[in-house]
Amino acid sequence: MNAELEREEGLVKEALNIFRVAQEKAITLRLLGGIAFRVRCPSSSNEKLKRSYQDIDFFGLTKDRGRIRKLFSSFGYVEPRTLINILQEHRMIVENSQNNTKVDIFLDVFEMSHKLKFTERTTLDEPTLPLADLLLTKLQAFEFTQREYKDVFALLKDYDLTRSEEKNGINAAYIAKLCGNDWGLSKTVLVNLGRVMRSISSYLPAIEDQTIVFGRISQLKDILEREPKSVKWKMRAIIGQRLRWYEIPEEIKRIPGPF
C-alpha cells in the first residue's frame, strides 16, 4: 500500500471511529467533506475521480460544543489558537500532532460561499449528512475546484434523484425548496451544475456513465427551475448580479501563542 492510500484509509478509519464513539455518547456528529464522499460513494475510488484527502470534516450542534471538545480530547486532539476557534461560534478546528490530522467541525450551520442550516438534518442519515446535503456543500461553492468536480461526479454517478428523503437517494425536492427561497444559493448551484455538465467527458470516460450523470443533472436543473420562488427570492432577483451574492471563505489564520 502506497503512502497516499495508507493515509486515506487511516483518515476514513479515524473518522468512522470518532463517529462511533460519538454515537455511543449520544453526541450528534455527522461526516461531510471529502471523507464523507469517500465513505458514501464507491465511484470515488475510480481512477478519474480519485483525489487526495487532507483532513476530516464533521457537522455537529452548538449545544454539544463542550462535549465535542472532550470527545476529541480523548482521541488526542487539541484546539489550536486560530481565528476560527477564537471568534466563531459555529465552527471549531482541532488537531492531532500524533497522527498529523486536522478536523474541521461546523456547528449548527455550514457557512462557506453560502450559509446552510443542517440542524434538523442530522437525524436523517448516518454516518454522514444526507446525500442531498453533501451535494449542496459542493454546489454552493463559488470557487469550484477539482475536488468539487470529483465529489459531485462520484455522488451523481452512484445515486439517483428522489422526491423524498431516502437513505440511498438525493432528495431533489429538498434542494429545490432551499434554492426557491434563496436567489443567491440558486444562482450558484445552477452555475455549478452547468460547469459540471460541460465537464462530464473529462471525468467520466464511459459513455454509459456520461449518459446517467447528464440525465441526473438535467433533471435536477429542471426541478430547480420549476420550483415556485418565494417573495424573498423574487426581490433579490431584481438586484441580480449587481450585488455579490456569495461569500469567499478566508483561510484559517493561526494566532501566535502557546498552542
Image (cartoon, helix red, strand yellow):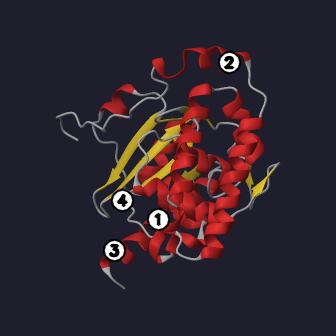
Of tags 2 and 3, which is closer to the observer? Answer: 2
Asked where in the image residue 167 lies, by quadrant, the reply is bottom right
Asked where in the image residue 183 lies, by quadrant, the reply is top right
* Residue ID for mark 2: 234
Q: Earlier in the sequence, mark 1 or mark 3?
A: 3
Q: Residue furthest bottom?
A: 1
Of tags 4 and 1, which is closer to the observer? Answer: 4
Q: Distance from label 4 to label 3 (Cα)? A: 10 Å
Labelled disc at residue 254? none
Q: Which of marks 1 and 2 is nearer the N terminus?
A: 1
Q: Distance from label 1 to label 2 (Cα)? A: 45 Å
Q: Which residue lies furthest to the right in this view?
A: 164
Is residue 18 something one can see in this rendering?
Answer: no
Q: In this view, does 53 lie to the left or right of 90?
A: left
Which x, y percent locates residue 122?
67, 45
Q: Where is the N terminus found, in terms of image quarters?
A: bottom left
Is residue 153 something one can see in this rendering?
Answer: yes
Residue 37 vs residue 56, the one in the foreground? 37
* Residue ID for mark 1: 14
- Label 1 crowd (10 A; few <14 / some 14-19 / many >=20): some
* Residue ID for mark 4: 54
- Label 4 crowd (10 A; few <14 / some 14-19 / many >=20): some
Please, what is the three-letter code of the amino acid marked with disc 4? Answer: Gln
Residue displayed at 48% across by 69% down: 49
Residue displayed at 50% across by 40% down: 106
Task: Tell me the element at label 3.
Answer: helix
* Residue ID for mark 3: 4
Of tags 4 and 2, which is closer to the observer? Answer: 2
Task: Tell me the element at label 2.
Answer: helix
Q: Where is the C terminus found, in terms of image quarters?
A: top left
Asked where in the image residue 6 lies, by quadrant, the reply is bottom left
Which x, y percent locates residue 221?
68, 45
